[in-house]
Every structure is written in structure tokens, then in C-alpha cells.
Amino acid sequence: MTTEQPLEIDLLLAQRLAAGVDPIVHAYRSGDHQDTDAKALAAPEVLQALMPARDVQSITDLPTPEQVDGHLAALSEVLCRTRARFTAALHHPLYIVPPMAERLGSSVSVRLQWLLLCWISEATWQALHSTDVGMQVPLTDTEADLLRPLAARQRFLVLAEAFRGDRPTGQRGPQDDADRVFGAQSTHLFLARAAQARWEWTGILHRHQSHPLLAAATSSQLEAELDQLLFDHPGSGPPLSVSSNRLRQRQRGNDPVGYSADDDQTITALVEHHLLPRYRWGAARRSSWALTRYPRWAKTITTIIFVLCAVVVGLIGASALWPTLFGHSTLGTAAALVCLTYLAGAVGVAVHGRSWAWPWLLRVPAAAAIGLFMVTTMHPSWWHAAFRQAGMSLPPDTPPPPVQPQWVALGFAVAALAYLIVNARNTGLSTSAALGRAIGVWALAALHALFVALCGIAWAVPVFSEDGTVFRAAWTDYPQAALVCLAQAGSWCLAAGVFSQMLWDGRPLTAPLTHTHWRDER
């Protein structure tokens, strides 16, 4: 049997409450309120109102849900008696631990600390949302509006603690009291309130720019808060599940398996509203794999795609030295493998659903195909220049271009990268973060554009373009010129794929390849 080591303060919960946007929500308070908050929560009537929380850990004589609701109403009334008490409970709820330890004459265990915070967060949230005319919150209407997001945040972080898996194994924790925190056999109440808390806080973060305090948060603060909402433990690990199945797994000490429909909806909304627009490719990929029905197959298909991409890039590079392999054009073979790569991607989406497609930027190849149409209809002088430089005899056409083909390709590629950097900066990212993430997205987009261009010049240009058959026949004789033309076509497709984002009604380049939602976007 495991034993629980009493701690002065639950450090994990304290770190979560102090992370993310916490500094911002305190910004409207002038001066240092730590001593004032500690004194307000040490009031004897506040401690007395919280004493029944100890009965929840009793083996016998557990309070009923109705009795706990009465205790919560009484706690709300006590906290609402003074403004100092109510704001202290919202800003520094853990300040209740030292006076409670003094009242009990012993350290307050981690489990009891969590119970106390569950009651405090529920009492403050109910007070701010109460329709009872007898419940008078000691705040102005403006202050109440400012503090409702803080109450929603605190309520979610506290209740979600029972579902997280980053506490030491073998130690009893919040998950062991989740069935009784709101009374005997109250698992359904706890799960409903935890799910509601996540809905509330998710909705607030979706429209954070409409809130005076949250709008002032930096990008790093907001992303830290989103990580706490989305992931089991930020920085690593799978997405957080708030479900009965996850709670049972935590109580048994098992690894998390599967996500509920509500988990799927919440994670999808957070990834598509926040991670993808901020170019957080790695975090989106983690979430993508977690939501797939068959995680092993998802990783297997992903590995196959990566291997095929590496082979295609290798063949493109090798074509400069070996224009033909086994009697076939090297670039033509690479184009065939590109088709196989996209076929593997289509199988992945068909089997695993839209979440599996998040990291792949499927809007880029779709838009790059438009650029390919333009390449196909251009005057052949765009590729004549490269082959003429390589020594190929071509009939005279227009005067030589003022800029060499390789510089044209470079110019389009740099313009696309600059656009992505500006786009990332406009989402509020710091300069270094915007630069790093934009380069990552640009690299994946460039790979898509190169693959689309390769298929185009292998099959579309020879069929539909003027002098297309001459172009196709010259591939193997002038491999370096063929690579220059591929770079030109790829850069044009890249520019078309990136700049077409302006036509997508405000949706980012990283958005899924879909336009319709059936969610309330308010």
C-alpha cells in the first residue's frame, strides 16, 4: 500500500497556476497583494467554511452531493462578504494552505490541498455566474467581467489535475478523490463539471483578443496556457483527456488509451484555431498521432512517406550525374515515386481521418497545382534559356532574359519565405520564433511544390506545352538544365501555393483542406 507524503504546497499545481497568462491576469491590480491575500484567506470564517472538505476523505459518513452543494453555497457567501477575500480566492487560492495547516495542527496533504482548491474554484465560479439575487459579488460589473476568465481558468486547471499523468507513480493523488470531491458517488458531477470547465476556458481562449486582460498576453504566455489546456503535461506527452475512461486509467495507474468524442472535438478546435495558425508543426503532429484510431499504423504510414520523400529527393539530386537508371529517366522515376507518396498520404487520411492530415499542409499542393497550370501555358522561352545555357541548339525566339533562370527560381523562393515570416509575425510571434517556424513551414511547402512541379514537367508540360516533346526529349541529354527548369517550375508553384493563402477568407496556409465547420465560432 502506498503512502502519501504531506507537502507544504502542491508544487505541480502551484506551477500550473503560476504559468501561462497568470502574470497578465494580475496586471490590473496595483501594488503587491500577496500579504493582503494571505491575510484575507486566513480569516477564521473562511477556514471554518472549508473544514467540511476534510469529510470527503472520510472512509465512512461521506457527505451527500446535496450536502456538498450546501457547503459550496456557504463558502461562496463567506468569500463574497469582502472584496479582499473574493479576489484573494481568485488570484492566490493556494494561500489557504498555511493557515489551514495551522488550524489543523499538521501539514496539509496534496490530496486535501486539491480538495480545498476544488471547493474554492467552484465556489468563486458559481458566485460569478449566479442568478440568485441574494448572492452579491463584492465587485463592480466591470471587475466581474474582467475576472470571469480567471475563475474559468482556475476551475479548469484545478479539476483537470485528476486527469493528468505527470505525478510520481505510486503516490495517491487527486484522481483518488475525484469520485467523492463533490459528495458520495458523485463521479458524474465531477466529470460534468470538469468537461464544462474545459469548454468554458477553451471558448475564452478562442476569443482571447476580445478580453482586455488576455489580449495583453504575449505569444509565449498564450502558448504556454494553450499547452496546459491541450496537453497532459506541456512540453511532452500526449493531449489531455478529460473523460471517465481517462479517470479510471489514472486511478488504476495505467497508461492513457483512447480519447472520447468530446476530447476529439476540443483537441481538434485547439489545433486548428491555435497551433496550426502559429505554425506549431511539431505540436500538431503529436496531437495528430494521438487522435488516430490506429496509432501504430499512423506512424508506419508516416515513416513510409518520409522514406519515399527521401528517395525522391535523392533521385532528383542523382539525376545530375545519372540521367537514366536501368534504362529509364531518373526524373521520370522520381515523378512516379511522388505519385506513390501522395497515394500513401491519401490512404493515411482515408484511414485515420482529418486529424492525421494536420501536419502535411495539404493546401499547398492543391494551390501549387494552380501554379503548374500557369507553367504549362507559358511560352517555352522559360525553359529555352536554361537549355540554351547548357549548349542545346534551339530555334531563335525572344531575346535572352534579363535575369538567369536560377535567379528567378531563387527570387520566388525568397519571396515565399518572406511572406511566411511576415504572416508568422502578424500572429504575435517573437522574431526568433517567427523565423524558425516560418522556415520549417517553408521547407515543407517547398517540398510539396517541388513534387508537384516534378510531376508537371514529367507529364503535363510535354503533352500540353508548346515544344513540350522537345523539352521531354532533352531531359536525359542535358540533366543540369533539366534541374534548373525543375527549380524554376518548383519555385513558381511554391509562390502560387503560398500567396494563394490571401484568397482563403482569413484561413492560414496550415489550415486543413476543408472549408465548412459546424461549430459556434462566437
Image (cartoon, rainbow, N blue to C red):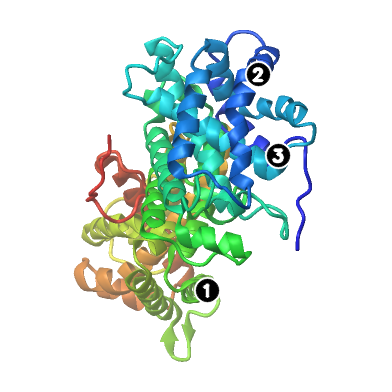
Going from N to C along the chain, the mark reached first, 2 or 3, is 3
Examine the image and state in which quarter residue 330 appears. Answer: bottom left
Label 1 amino acid?
Thr
Residue pictured at 22% horizontal, 73% vertical: 463
Report the number of discs: 3
Q: Are marks 2 and 1 in contact (CB under 8 Å)?
A: no
Q: Secondary structure at mark 3?
A: loop
* On screen, residue 432 above or below 441: above
Rendering coords of residue 319 (x, y %): 50, 75
Image position, residue 434 (x, y; %): 53, 38
Q: Quadrant of the C terminus?
A: top left
In this picture, residue 487 sits left or right of residue 62:
left
Query: Mark 1 or mark 2, which is nearer the start of the sequence?
Result: 2
> What is the C-alpha distance between the residues marked 2 and 1?
62 Å
Residue beneath disc 2 = 44
Q: Quadrant of residue 236?
A: bottom right
Q: Which residue is mark 1?
A: 303
Mark 3: few/some/many CA within 10 Å (<14, 14-19, 20+): some
| In front of the other: 235 or 493 | 235
C-alpha gap between disc 2 and disc 3: 22 Å
Amino acid found under the numbered disc labelled 2: Pro
- Asked whether, in this view, residue 216 is left or right of residue 58, the answer is left
Give whichever of 12, 89 is nearer the camera: 89
- Of marks 1 and 3, which one's residue comes earlier in the chain? 3
Image location of residue 341, percent across then percent down: 41, 74
Residue placed most toward the observer, 351 or 142: 142
The residue that label 3 is drawn on is 10
Q: Disc 1 on helix, strand or loop?
A: helix
